[in-house]
Image (cartoon, grey):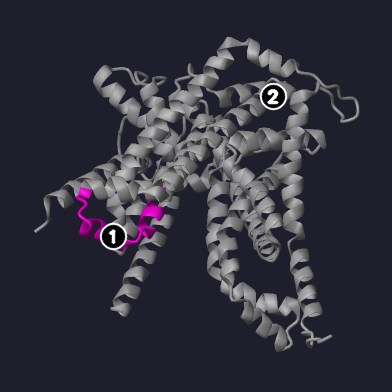
Amino acid sequence: MISFPKKQQKPKDHKKLNFEFYLGTPYFLMIIALVLIPIALMVLYAFTTESNNLISIRFTFDHFKEFFRQPTFISSMAESIYLSLISATICLIICYPLAFILSRRKLVTQKILVSLITSNMFINSLLLAYAVRSIFEIIGNYFYGDARHFLGTDLAIITGMVYLYLPFMLLPIYTHMAKLDKNLFESAEDLGANKFQTIVRVVIPMSISSVLTGFMMVFLPASTTLVITRYLGGGQRKMIGDLIDLAFKSSKFGYGAAIALVLAVILLIFVGLIKKFDKYEGVLANEE
Amino acid sequence: MKSKSKIFADIYIYTVLIIVLIPLISMIVFSFNESNSLIVFTGFTFKWYGDIFTSRALREPILNTLLVAGISTFVSVILGTLGAMALSKQNRIFRELALSANNIPILSPDILTAVAFFVFLLAFGIERGLTAMILAHISFSTPYALLAIYPKVRSLDPNLLDAAYDLGATPGKALWKVVLPQLKGSIIAGAAIAFTMSFDDYIVSKFASGELVNNISTYMYSQSHGIKPNVNALSTIIILIIGIKVILDYVKLKNNKNEEE
């Protein structure tokens, strides 16, 4: 038998590996203790009766039954999803051409414009929502003589959502567009495509995944907001976040956890649908 | 001569920019307003800026915000760096699993994180308050810090580390002298994201604090008669600091570009 001289490095590599794994222990412990266990507990609370310790629990579906029996809750869930889908669509319509135009400017101009347009991200979201509200109040006061004229309307809520979450749509799309190879546009042109065809056939298929990321980044926080209804809802509009908040305020913890769980499942379905759409488009883009 | 489409593009960019900045501008303008109102401008004053430092009601929320954001940023950057280094050396399946767990707090809406954390506090009988708030902020800031640092860790040249070991460095020394200096930029970026997240958070803070202690966000939310201009003044100062930072970056970028040419 021929034997190659074995490299002596093996045991050392092993030691290094171990060392780096131990380095990560605090991180892994944190994720388990503060992320995974809370979620498990939330599921547990949603399916059990109220009790103060973990031993005397009993499984139940009452919280879910109570939730689905209340038509107002179903309608506010539907309304949350409806309003945030519209807002995400408006953000997309604004940001897509914007990202495209920005990505073709000089690098310095790009950077400065992007940081200016996304500067709202650095204001506290409550204050931003309040600032949007005061704009509506100024307009309402000036034209209708009633500062609260717009509060509680779809217009006010959707505008608020667009202001708060626009950067989350712009940033992924812009980052993606900025990375697109400029030669692709030239080759499309050389192959006889006009500007419109280049955009439809080259730019859109290649940026679809960033669009979906942006869409989720707007849709998820918008549909569960507490801030927007507080300042722009005029005290009459209740969205799903407010219901969860209300349940916890009145100490119905299991019930609150159940609503949160239903919400999580619905959002997961939406995210799944969006991801599926992404795959489909990806295949198409490869074929063309 | 500009082409026609370029002019349209310019008009589009600057229209969006102006519309986006309207609330920001109104916020800054009304921080100088004489009266309490955020709707009618009555006169120019600096009193709200002084109020930030003298107002008793505002002092506790400001200190709490700085404390919570400071500690949680510090801890989450350390955890994120260590986690990123550990993850980059694991096999693919473990890595993917860990990264999906890491993405949970990022993707899940704040209210779900808040509810889960609240139930966690309840089940273990942990008292709500400042400590709980810090823990909660660590739990959602660390994943962002990790995501900022992880790509850089993966792109590190493994030969450098080997060279350090060959030259007789202990693992601790190699980490301190070789790995961390290369990660400095992304660690700072991670810290900036973590701090912004902590500073901007409202819902998780509200659930974790049990409304017993206030940070800026929960304080603002609890003002049922609307937000006073002193909060505007505070935000104007923060925006000013960030603005100066952006301008400095811009100048640096321009200088770098000039050197290259």
**Foreground tag (1 vs 2):** 2
Asked whether residue A133 appears in the rendered view, the answer is: no
Tell me the kind of residue under disc 1. Thr
Q: Position of residue A90 (x, y in %)?
A: 36, 34
Q: Quadrant of the N terminus of chain B?
A: bottom left
Task: Say if labels 1 and 2 share a chain.
Answer: yes
Label 1 or label 2, whichever comes before in sequence order: 1
Q: Locate residue B21: give its quadrant.
A: top left
- Give the Cα separation between the discs numbered 1 and 2: 49 Å
Please tell me whether residue B226 is drawn above or below residue B127 in the rendered image.
above
| Residue wearing tag 2 | A258
Labelled disc at residue B168: none
Task: Name the residue rendered at 57%, 42% in the picture.
Answer: B107
| Residue A42 shown left or right of residue A87 in the figure | right
| Residue A89 shown left or right of residue B141 in the figure | left
Please tell me whether residue A266 is drawn above or below residue B233 in the rendered image.
above
Task: Name the residue rendered at 59%, 67% in the picture.
Answer: B154
Q: Position of residue B259 (x, y in %)?
A: 32, 79
| Residue wearing tag 1 | A109
Q: Locate residue A45: give its quadrant.
A: top right
* Magenta range: A173-195
Asked whether residue A242 appears in the rendered view, the answer is: yes
Task: Name the residue rendered at 62%, 52% in the picture.
Answer: B143
| Residue A197 shown left or right of residue A211 in the figure | left
| Residue B191 shown left or right of residue B96 in the figure | left
SS at circle 2: helix
Identify which residue, A79 or A159, lies in the foreground. Answer: A79
Is residue B63 rendered magenta in the image? no
User: Farthest residue toward the left?
Assistant: B1
User: Label 2: how many residues lie within 10 Å, few (<14), some (14-19) or many (20+)?
Assistant: many
Q: Quadrant of the C terminus of chain B?
A: bottom left
Q: Position of residue A239 (x, y in %)?
A: 53, 22
